[in-house]
Image: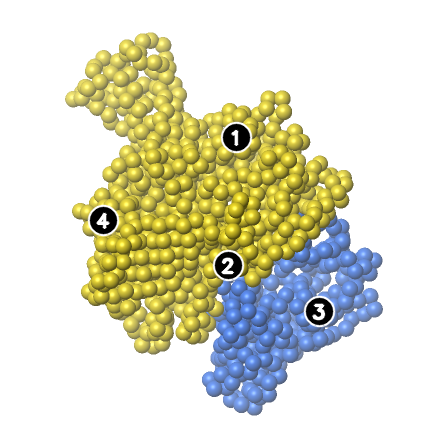
Chain colours: A blue, B yellow
Amino acid sequence: MQVPAPFDYERATSVDDAISKLERLGEEARLVAGGHSLIPMMKLRLTDLEYLIDINDLHDELGYVRVGVDEVRIGAMTRHRELLESPELAAVFPIFADAEQVIADPVVRNRGTIGGSLCQADPSEDLTAVCTALDASCVIRSSSGERVVSMEDFHRGPYETAVGQAEILTEVRLPVRPGGSSAYAKVERRAGDWAVTSAGAAVWMTDGVITNARVGLAAVGPNTAGIPAISELMQGKPPSEELYAQAGELASAACNPSTDNRGTVEYKRHLADELTRRTLRTAVQRIEAGLAGDEGGNR
Amino acid sequence: MTALDKSVQEAAVEHEDLEHADNDKTPLGHGRMLRKEDPRFIRGMGRYVDDLQLNGMLHLAILRSPVAHANIVSIDVSAAQAHPKVKAVITGADLAAQGLAWMPTLSNDVQAVLATDRVRFQGQEVAFVVAEDRYSARDALELIDVEYDVLPPVVDVRKALAPDAEVIRTDLEGKKDNHCFDWETGDKDATEAVFAKADVVVKQDIVYPRVHPAPMETCGCVADYERVSGQLTLWTTSQAPHAHRTVYALVSGLPEHKIRVIAPDIGGGFGNKVPIYPGYVCAIVASLVIGKPVKWMEDRTENLVSTGFARDYVMQGEIAATKEGKILAIRTHVLADHGAFNGTAAPIKYPAGFFGVFTGSYDLEAAYCSMTAVYTNKAPGGVAYACSFRITEAVYLVERIVDCLAYELEMDPVELRKKNFIQPDQFPYTTKTGWVYDSGDYERAMDVALEMAGYDDLRREQEEKRAKGELMGIGVAFFTEAVGAGPRKDMDILGLGMADGSELRVHPTGKAVLRVSCMSQGQGHETTFAQIVAEEIGIPVADIQVVNGDTDQTPFGLGTYGSRSTPVSGAAAALVARKVRDKAQIIASGMLEVSVADLEWQKGSFQVKGDPGRSVTIQDIAMRAHGAGDLPEGIEGGLEAQICYNPSNLTYPFGAYICVVDIDPGTAEVKVRRFVAVDDCGTRINPMIIEGQVHGGLTDGIGMALMEMISFDEDGNCIAGSLMDYLIPTALETPHWETGHTVTPSPHHPIGAKGVGESATVGSPPAIVNAVVDALKPYGIRHADMPLTPSRVWDAMQGHPTPPI
């Protein structure tokens, strides 16, 4: 059994309480939500902290999916399983169900949260790519108030985000625009493995013409701007296989993978291309079918 | 009644119902039945080493080398010793002072218990801490300060013998290189002559990468040395408790009768729990020094980076044939990576295990293998990981190279195999490397598999799919295994002959206890062995308790690995039961007042020939054997016997496997769609258990073929130190297994049974790889090495399949 180094443990009762604990305990304190990344790192003694502030009691306050007319708001403590099983969310953003089906395994999904995933900022983590495709923004709270940042500003690199020491991510906001749909696809060596490469795409169309398209990639280097070149390429054009292929090439060129046990640089670039094409195609098919639908790109 | 009482009572009732349900279906001997141990395991009531809590028990943790190759400049343990909960900190120097810094391996090499002057692989044991709890023990490890002077590591096996390679084994006097051993088998000249006359010769480099047994339960022990009695009790994760006890006696100098080794429930072994690891010795030393029980349990990383790996063979295969497809000869050279110490678990005369069966299931004119084994800066081992002593590598080699030949001849792989099978009338068949296959009917097993798979339809479907650009592959593999070591004249582990004892005692009421020397790690011995005895002596399976794993409670024997339990201990169980039955017959003759020859055995009772009304049951006889009144002249009271079984030959199970895969042309992901496994393990004692073993082995095969590999970076860092990095398959990667069987009994085994535990692990990797390579035929690919991860399959599709090492 792997055992962590000594640490102190406190439970936060509210967001404000969590913030005041972070302020009181200082740099050596960390928040724990689902714990499926942080706890293994502690047990492997890869991370060193003195205080663990458990925010699972904040699920009542921060566990929600609110689908509005022009915006979806997801509380940071919303569990993967709740994202997977929300028909309201699937109706507007089918990309979530696509992605959540292939994130880890049911045990992890029962505990892991969207906030934890985004804040852990693992380079292979899937929800950053999903949020990138959907042009999300993140609400960060501190004792001096709230600020809202784009994904691009939120994600600073591997394991690094805009969330400061005495701050907490409280909510993810996703704009809802008409005529849109989305899809996600992932290649992994085995169910539950981190992605070799993943891609998420969101497309918006009016009268058979693409008005915007965004692609988020995972595990191939940071990409939190939705690959603007793809948006530029696809805007104002009707969808076609040729267009998807061009977008795939742009995605392949835009990413920055490295060779490891999961695959070579060449293969990962190929997947960025292939999965970009697939997810764009699926998103467009979903728009054309008149639904966001729940038939994932991975099936 | 308290809630607890109530729940206990309900559980008891429920359990009884379960037993009744079983008993209705329980055969009086061989046949399908649920395992007797299932209620215990399913309810979480198994009792494993780490469940053990003893009064005053302390906890041991091991400091391991962070680098692959280095001289130890200094070790400062003062801060660790000052930790308030630490009882002792021991280094290699401390052990060396007691002559305990080194221990023998199972291959007559030596291995450091704790490194003294040099570390030779990442994860090697450097020092240990004993503390009041396991948290403090781990904390104190971080307080030990070791200064290393890093040396160039030998990581690439192909460069281990280069003149400029750093010499790893400086502990061996006069050692000037990293050569471990050379080995050869077969006739080199005869093979060369056959190759010279062959129409077709196909050569292929084939790598079987390093993999790990990765049992669910890691290794560990509790050592308890009683100073007053001088008794050492060791609860440990051992597949071979008796062999371990003898080795501990030889290493520690403690008298063997004062050592008791107990293997409780074991959470999977797969060969990983055959060797003796430094951690066990450290725990024993700690208990001797401190006089308290000491527990050591590995964590997952320790298990993956330091304990016995498997495979790691770089093979060159060559096959010679006529243009019509008659295979004439097979030749191979193997470069074997044995890590820093040669810890291979194999009979001493067989440094390459049973790799000599690389001639497969085919009737050849000649065969030859040469092997060079080397030391590298990697973990030691080379265990019998569900491989029957390297048969996994041998079968993979032959079944791949035969497929390569089929590719070159443009012949169907089934047709090619059938053309070359050893025929039923050729058994017993002596191979060109000297193995005597006991029995077989290969074509029949192959036909059953073809029928189950619908082979011709699959080929038609493949043709249609290929026309549409879809990638579908059909892989065929046929294996012959050699399992059940001894015979003792040829086979021993560290001088201990591979024969197994067994003892059967029938109590006055007709209930029985069977004591066996082999050791279950989840194989279902409590059921299988009770069934073997029930079949012979007619006592219901539920009335037979099987005891294993405690050296004070069981007769001597060499343990469970290499699929040897049923071939050796199973034979012992059958024969000891017959011995008891012979005695029972004499007692029955007295009870029925007839001569022994006038009695006939009806399973469970003796009756007078021609007079079915006059009979006595085995239970009646048991009571009589222990009861008042005279027994026939010369017969002692009691109804029990003990034997030691020395097999006259190995048993040779075989099977035909067919795998169907689909590959996504865009992502190169492999999906195993179907898998048909037809196994022939001779007499089938409990088909459910056999099927379970086959399911497990097939899943294992998917792991090795598609994802598993212990890999290293160029500095010798093991980059497979967690189950996030070392992938083992899940239910989602496995298809519905389609199992079938034929029955060709072993002629020399008392009940005709052969081992089956490792058959599927041996047979499935080539079937899966053959299927993947078959699917990639449109790309002109003849071979691609495991593990066939999407990235590596994609490489192959680009026309450059790369070896994994």
Few, some or many C-alpha atoms within 10 Å of disc 3 (few <14, some 14-19, many ≥20)? some
Q: In terms of secondary structure, where does tag 1 sit?
A: helix
Left-right relation of B403 to B340 = left
Q: Is residue B229 above or below residue B702?
A: above
Q: Nearer the viewer, mark 1 or mark 4?
A: 1
Q: Determine the residue positioned at 51% across, 68% down.
A: A263
- Marking on residue A161: 3
Locate the N terminus of chain B by quadrant: top right
**Residue B347 location in percent, x, y?**
40, 41
Disc 2 marks a residue whose amino acid type is Pro
The image quadrant that residue B228 belongs to is top right
Q: Which residue is mark 2?
A: B163
Asked if the residue under mark 3 is in contact with the one under mark 1, i.e. CB atoms within 8 Å, the reply is no
Few, some or many C-alpha atoms within 10 Å of disc 2 (few <14, some 14-19, many ≥20)? few
Q: In terms of secondary structure, where does tag 4 sit?
A: loop
Q: Determine the residue positioned at 49% across, 64% down.
A: A189
Left-right relation of B757 to B606 = right
Asked if the residue under mark 1 is in contact with the one under mark 2, i.e. CB atoms within 8 Å, the reply is no
Q: In terms of secondary structure, where does tag 3 sit?
A: strand
Q: Which residue is mark 1?
A: B249
**Residue B773 location in percent, x, y?**
36, 66
Disc 1 marks a residue whose amino acid type is Ala
Separation of residues labelled 4 and 2 (CA atoms): 50 Å
Q: Which residue is mark 4?
A: B441
